[in-house]
Image (tube, grey):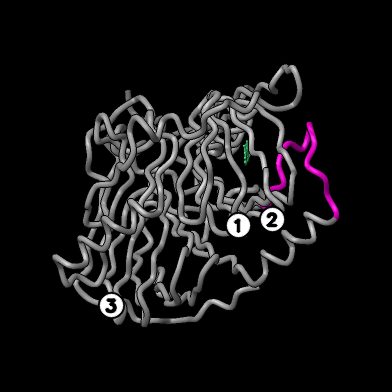
Amino acid sequence: MTIDATHTESELEEFYRDLAAVDLQPLWTITADLLTPTPRPKAVPWLWSAATMKPLARRAIRLVPVERGGERRVLSLQNPGLGGQPYAVGTLWGALQCLGPREKAPAHRHSPGAIRFVLAGEGVFTTVDGDACDMHPGDLVLTPAMNWHDHVNGGDGEMFWFDGLDLPMVAALDGTFFEPWAGPGLNQPEPAEHNVSERTYAGGTRHTDGAVTGPLSPRHSRLMVYRWADTTAQLDRLAAASDAPLLAVEYTDPETGASVMPTLACAVHRVRAGGRSLPVRRAGNAVYVVYSGHGSSVIAGQRFDWGPGDMFAVPSWAPVEHAADEQADLFVLTDTPVLRALGLYREERLAEAQPVTSVFEPR
Ligand code: 1HN
């Protein structure tokens, strides 16, 4: 069959109208970038500063109760590139959550998996399917998919932590399920003993070069809480054995060595005092949370200055490099396990620092 050279312009127009009328779209007229040479995420590099977020979280503690329905006192990171969606990057939810003295957030479970990285305060425990995990600054707590979870502040102070979820991924897959705790009461009963998973599995990080490289696993870690003392001790050991500008550990499933969840990888990147890492870009999105130290990161040519409690988004394939005058610890959440499982993961290490073309001004 060859093209009918005798067709008229109006015949062609009629053909396109007929296609549109029956919900068909010819690929050859689609101008949207379907097949970009490299990932082109809608999310932009962005930073949310603790100086801005924390007073607003405190106002929320004063003004807004934590109740069934709203469920949580959470300020979600809304990436300005994502058209008003409450997502830090296209595949990851990131947020600041807080709980005032003696407050309890009701129990529920859902198919999106979540992690908590504690920023400040004492007194809260998160109960994960009946296991009450005490939370202290620097600890990582897992609430994997469909595990019942609630947060109880048994103390007299306020507490702040970072929430990371795979919710946007699960939503894109139309796989969202949610169930409130049916009772009795709004919370799981507090068990006599806390930290049961920790007694069986404590520890759980592995040295990496910043990339996620362990075995893949469709199951989540059975350890629900990773203590900062273990994480920092491992980073200290690495720092003593290497003079690299950036040292990284990934939190792992202590039984398999895999990432903590099938969808999410968690790591801490320590930037040495005076250290400056070379740029690297990775397929997949990342959210960084500054736990300690001051420094700056260059993301796709833009410099972001940061300090404790700041959070920033590194969208897929944006080159990123870090520098710190004093030692800095960055908690890093990524969707790497999903890209690796699907054969989509790549990374590229650049040989030279990026030229800085602009400096980000936090709001
Ligand atoms: C959730 O269940 C928590 O349990 C935090 O603390 C943030 C964001 C979206 C959906 C569920 C929590 C959440 C969330």
Residue 40 visible in the snapshot: no
Q: Position of residue 159 (x, y in %)?
A: 64, 54
Q: In the picture shown, does residue 112 fall above or below 241?
A: above
Q: Are marks 1 and 2 in contact (CB under 8 Å)?
A: yes
- In the rendered structure, the answer to whether residue 271 lies left or right of residue 67 reads left
Q: Residue 39: percent from the left, percent from the top?
A: 38, 51
Q: Position of residue 223 (x, y in %)?
A: 38, 33
Residue 121, numbered label? 1
Give the structural element (helix, strand or loop) at label 2: loop
Q: Which residue is mark 3?
A: 275
**Label ID, residue 158:** 2
Q: Contact, CB < 8 Å: mark 2 with mark 3?
A: no
Q: Secondary structure at mark 1?
A: loop
Quadrant assignment for ligand 1? top right
Q: CA distance from mark 1 to mark 3?
A: 29 Å
Q: Nearer the viewer, mark 1 or mark 3?
A: 1
Q: Is residue 359 above or below residue 116?
A: below
Position of residue 363 relative to residue 289, above or below, is below
Identify the amino acid type marked 2: Glu
Question: Label 3 neighbourhood size at 10 Å, few (<14), some (14-19), many (20+)?
Answer: some
Q: Quadrant of the N terminus?
A: top left
